[in-house]
Image (cartoon, rainbow, N blue to C red):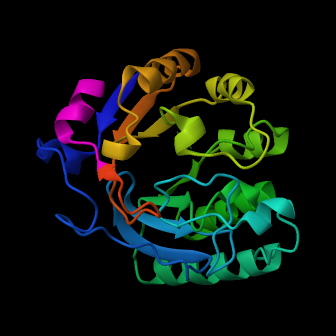
Amino acid sequence: MRLEIRKEMQKDTAPMGHLGVDEPKRRWNLDCEIVYGPISSRRFGYSLGINLLPSGQKVCDFDCLYCQCGWTPRSLVEQCFAGIPFPSLVDIKKVVDLQFRELASQDNQPDTIIFSGNGEPTLHPEFPRAVEEVERARDLYLPEARVGVLSNGSRLGESSVFQAVSGMDLKSVKFDAGGEWLDRPLMPYDLDALITTWHNLPNLTIQSFFSEGRFDNTGSRDVEPWLDGLTRIQPNRVQIYTLDRVPPVKLMRKASGETLRRLA
């Protein structure tokens, strides 16, 4: 298992103050099209994003206190995500073909193509087929790019979603210390079963968020179950990190570089 601290955090050896007082944070733009970027990513190099969720709207089955997309509307969960204007497969195919072809014509080759966007990408009702369309266009226009996903892992218990993710080059699943109170799953969530499922994903990266202060998940009460979970999952890599974008909870504090190194 390889454990990483995000590079920008290695420079930070002092605890940070409250958000907005001592360091500005970047904001996420919810007006996010199906294909966005490429952007420079600390995790994925020169990275092209894929958003399978509606532009201007967060869609997720978690309500994480630190989410860059803000709060999850409760109405989405109450309606079991019915009536959400997910982009159609026809639109996804049209957009990825157009955008990938244009990038190829400009010799603008991304290192990675990552499913992420305005929430949880695997909630798209035709996620496996959307992955097939993106991988087809990748093979045709951007063959050097690796395809990956950023996910909370909640739908990986569904065989079709598991197979779609399993075949990707890069698989990143979120698993936080204190996840029950920090991540606040809004749908039925069997973490014990999901840990077994995540264990079966090849070349898996686990990403884990930490904060200090009022919303502190760096103590033994939260860290010890997290370590037990990692022992069961046996990921190829663990990335630990802290605040970088504006969270919905304004008083969240970054975990210091010293704290992250201690946890590592």
Q: Nearer the viewer, residue 88 or 188?
A: 188
Where does residue 130 sit, x and y in percent of width and height? 75, 63
- Residue at 52% from the left image edge and 43% from the top image edge: 182
Q: Position of residue 118 (x, y in %)?
A: 59, 68
Q: Residue at x 52, y 61 (%)?
A: 113
Tell me if residue 171 can be seen.
no
Whether 61 is drawn above or below 182: the answer is: below
Quadrant in the picture for the N terminus: top left
- Residue 47 appears at what percent x and percent y? 42, 63
- The residue at the point 73 percent across, 64 percent down is 74
Question: Magenta residues?
Answer: 254-264
* The magenta stretch spans residue 221: no
Q: 194 or 189, which is in the foreground?
A: 189
Against 28, residue 14 (above or below) is above
In the image, 151 versus 170, the foreground residue is: 151
Provide the major secondary structure of the magenta segment: helix
Q: Quadrant of the C terminus?
A: top left
Question: Does the magenta portion include 260?
Answer: yes
Task: Indicate whether 205 appears above or below 229.
Answer: below
Asked if residue 8 shows in the view, the reply is yes
When asked about the image quadrant of residue 63, the answer is bottom right
Q: Is residue 213 left or right of residue 117?
A: left
Residue for point 79% across, 78% down: 85
| Residue 237 placement (x, y as % from top left) | 42, 30
Left or right of 259? Residue 209 is: right
Q: Is residue 82 above or below residue 230?
A: below
Q: Quadrant of residue 196?
A: top right
- Lateral position of residue 125 relative to residue 31, left or right: right
